[in-house]
Image: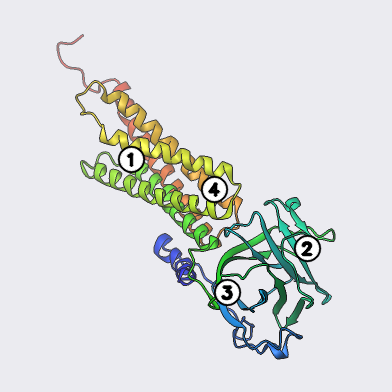
């Protein structure tokens, strides 16, 4: 369900949120897609074409098909199929659903038709720590197979385990290109975690995958820190003459931005734990913005009356803490977009909203400064008429 919600929200977000339409091009009808109805006997060699007990499921938003089977000798057979586009495809076995410490099988196809398959040990997230020809997976005597059928790449292999697999987290990833000559892998452009129930032969219900978490985290951050918070500050600065409505609009907008921002931080924390992302600058800025925004909420609760002597100090702290939180929040959205392969529709929405708010800021600031200069010009002029009796 998470996959379908993610597709729906990504298509609907621009129209609901930015009031613009971001077009998308549907795939052509003749483009191949993975299917559980594929006849493996016509595609793969033995023993992968002779196993009638293979269970199958479409995974990762139905972009891959996974056939799998485990016999009573703890021999596990897997067939993963997906569109390759001349990029590596990897499937890994993880103990906790995370990348680090896992072993993976990576396959690819060159443009000259030569295919390759290699095991990697995921010691860390850097390219140098993804070590080729190492890992905890043990192949059986059956040779792995990498077969191109149309636009689909089929990866088939058998593994022998010491004990039977039951609930097994499995990593699926797509690379940005094929492995280098020395075996090093170019960084993956997308990944997910799928949970397989080998004992029942089905894909288990699983938490939201990292790509969906990343999308929802980005949406919440853009709405909360990137739009509502700056809009609330614009209301407070340029619409104070609309008494008392400006105050209610300002406070409600800021509270909405704060709580949506909390959602973005919660999703980001979950994403960090799921992927072990080493995005320390983005994380530090996020927690700093959360602290400053929380301080603003506590300041609101302790707001002194206008007649209080403490009001001028409260105003000073409130103004500058709020402005600092806004600047850091918007900056952190840019940092987040720069650090990952974010959804293009979300980037366009944020860019449109940011430019709109920036134009509004320049317009209202210029108008306010012009109004403030008019009374000074009038005061500096000498009176037109002199009152009788005055010298």
- Dot 4 corresponds to which residue? 334
From the viewer's side, name the closer residue of 219 and 19: 219
The CA distance from mark 1 to mark 4 is: 26 Å
- Point out the image quarter for the C terminus: top left
Q: Which mark is residue 238?
A: 1
Pointer 1: residues within 10 angstroms few (<14), some, or many (20+)?
some
Q: Kindly state the secondary structure of the residue where label 3 is placed.
A: loop
Residue 26 seen in the current view = no
Disc with the residue nearer the chain's start (2 vs 1): 2
How many neighbours does mark 2 have within 10 angstroms: few (below 14), some (14-19), or many (20 or more)? many
| Image location (x, y in percent) of residue 166 | 56, 70
Q: Which is more N-terminal, label 4 or label 2? A: 2
Label 1 or label 4, whichever comes before in sequence order: 1
x, y percent for residue 174: 66, 66
| Label 3 sits on residue | 198
Q: CA distance from mark 3 to mark 4?
A: 42 Å
Q: Mark 1 vs mark 3: give the one in front.
A: 3
Q: Is residue 42 above or below residue 339?
A: below
């Amino acid at each position: 369900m998470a996959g379908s919600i993610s597709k729906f929200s990504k298509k609907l977000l621009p129209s609901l949120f930015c009031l613009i339409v971001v077009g998308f091009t549907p795939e052509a009808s003749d483009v191949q897609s993975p299917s559980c109805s594929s006849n493996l006997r016509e595609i793969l060699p033995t023993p992968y074409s002779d196993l009638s007990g293979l269970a199958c499921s479409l995974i990762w938003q139905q972009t891959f098909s996974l056939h799998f089977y485990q016999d009573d000798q703890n021999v596990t057979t897997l067939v993963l199929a997906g569109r390759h586009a001349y990029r590596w495809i990897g499937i890994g076995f993880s103990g906790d659903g995370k990348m680090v410490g896992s072993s993976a099988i990576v396959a690819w196809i060159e443009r000259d038709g030569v295919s390759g398959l290699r095991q990697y040990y995921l010691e860390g997230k850097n390219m140098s720590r993804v070590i080729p020809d190492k890992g905890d997976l043990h192949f059986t005597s059956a040779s792995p197979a990498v077969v191109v059928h149309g636009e689909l790449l089929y990866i088939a292999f058998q593994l022998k385990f010491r004990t039977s697999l039951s609930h097994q987290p499995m990593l699926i990833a797509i690379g940005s290109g094929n492995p280098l000559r020395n075996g090093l892998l170019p960084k993956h452009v997308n990944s997910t975690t799928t949970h397989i129930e080998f004992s029942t032969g089905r894909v288990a219900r699983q938490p939201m995958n990292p790509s969906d978490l990343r999308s929802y985290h980005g949406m919440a951050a853009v709405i909360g820190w990137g739009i509502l918070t700056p809009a609330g500050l614009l209301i407070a600065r340029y619409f104070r003459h609309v008494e008392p409505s400006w105050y209610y609009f300002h406070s409600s907008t800021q509270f909405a931005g704060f709580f949506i921002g909390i959602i973005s931080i919660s999703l980001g924390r979950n994403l960090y734990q799921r992927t072990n992302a080493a995005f320390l600058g983005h994380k530090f800025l996020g927690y700093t913005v959360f602290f400053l925004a929380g301080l603003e909420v506590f300041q609101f609760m302790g707001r002194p009356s206008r007649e209080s002597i403490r009001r001028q100090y409260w105003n000073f702290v409130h103004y500058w803490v709020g402005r600092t939180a806004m600047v850091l929040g918007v900056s952190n959205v840019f940092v987040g977009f720069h650090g990952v392969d974010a959804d293009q529709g979300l980037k366009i929405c944020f860019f449109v909203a940011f430019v709109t708010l920036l134009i509004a800021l320049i317009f209202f600031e210029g108008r306010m400064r012009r109004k403030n200069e008019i009374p000074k010009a009038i005061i500096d002029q000498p009176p037109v008429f002199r009152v009788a009796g005055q010298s």
